[in-house]
Image: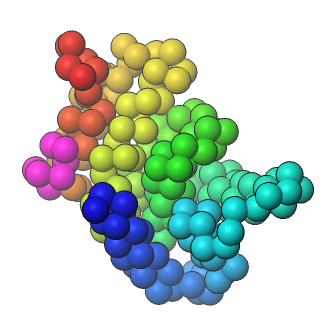
Amino acid sequence: MKKTKKICWVLMVIFVLFNHVGLAIGDEIQFGPKEAYILLDYFLRLDPEPTEIKEKLAQYNQWASVYAKYSQKKLLTKNEMKVYLLIVFMAEEKGVVHTQEEIYKEIVSKFESQPEVYLAALEELPFFIPVTCKVLKEHFFFVNEPDKKHQFAKKYEKIILQNLGEKSGSECLKHIKRGLEGEK
């Protein structure tokens, strides 16, 4: 049942994210149908699992190239941030370790450079809140600065609550703060 629910959420996300496939405004990253398929296939395994090392590497390289487009851009539009959050969600759910490590390094800077855009995208995709806020928390452990997590939560508490609302904002803060003061 849990897997079916995740698939339904992913399909809803695909609909929300990709109803603008092929459209780009200004310097927005062009997100094409091929890239949408790469992400969807990587998450749902529409094609059979490759058996040859070369095929597996090619498949991973496709995933990595889509991820790189969104991670390397300094400022993202709201639509680009939605795709980035989908990649964060997929990396966590699928356990894509190399991508997770890169995301853990960069996610706080992505948030801090554009908190309003990050939270606006998250507000439209509330089912990503638990995962993306947990990943924000993981950043501080990955970079070995767990004491800075509390400062981050305190600094952004107001903006998180304003943008996500009391219920969703509190949920996000709960995930970020988890592990503080003996909480697990």
Question: In the image, what residue occupies the spot 50% across and 81% down?
Answer: 18
Question: In the image, what residue occupies the spot 48% across and 45% down?
Answer: 92
Q: Can residue 150 be seen?
A: yes
Quarter of the image for the C terminus: give it. Answer: top left
Extreme right residue here?
54
Total labels: the figure holds 0
User: Residue 130, percent across and down?
Assistant: 30, 47
Q: Is residue 175 left or right of residue 3?
A: left
Q: Can residue 106 be seen?
A: no
User: Residue 38, percent across and down?
Assistant: 66, 70
Q: Which residues are magenta?
A: 165-171
Identify the colour scheme used: rainbow
The image quarter in which residue 183 lies: top left
User: Residue 80, percent across and down?
Assistant: 53, 66
Instruction: Answer above or below: position of 15 versus 140.
Output: below
Instruction: Answer above or below: position of 181 versus 7.
Output: above
Residue 169 on the magenta segment: yes
Quarter of the image for the N terminus: give it. Answer: bottom left
| Majority secondary structure in the magenta region | helix
Question: In the image, what residue occupies the spot 42% across and 81% down?
Answer: 15
The image quarter in which residue 23 lies: bottom right
Question: In the image, what residue occupies the spot 53% across and 67% down?
Answer: 44
Instruction: Answer above or below: position of 175 versus 146.
Output: below
Instruction: Answer above or below: position of 50 versus 182.
Output: below
User: Residue 82, percent across and down?
Assistant: 46, 65
Residue 163 on the magenta segment: no
Q: Nearer the viewer, residue 19 or 72?
A: 19
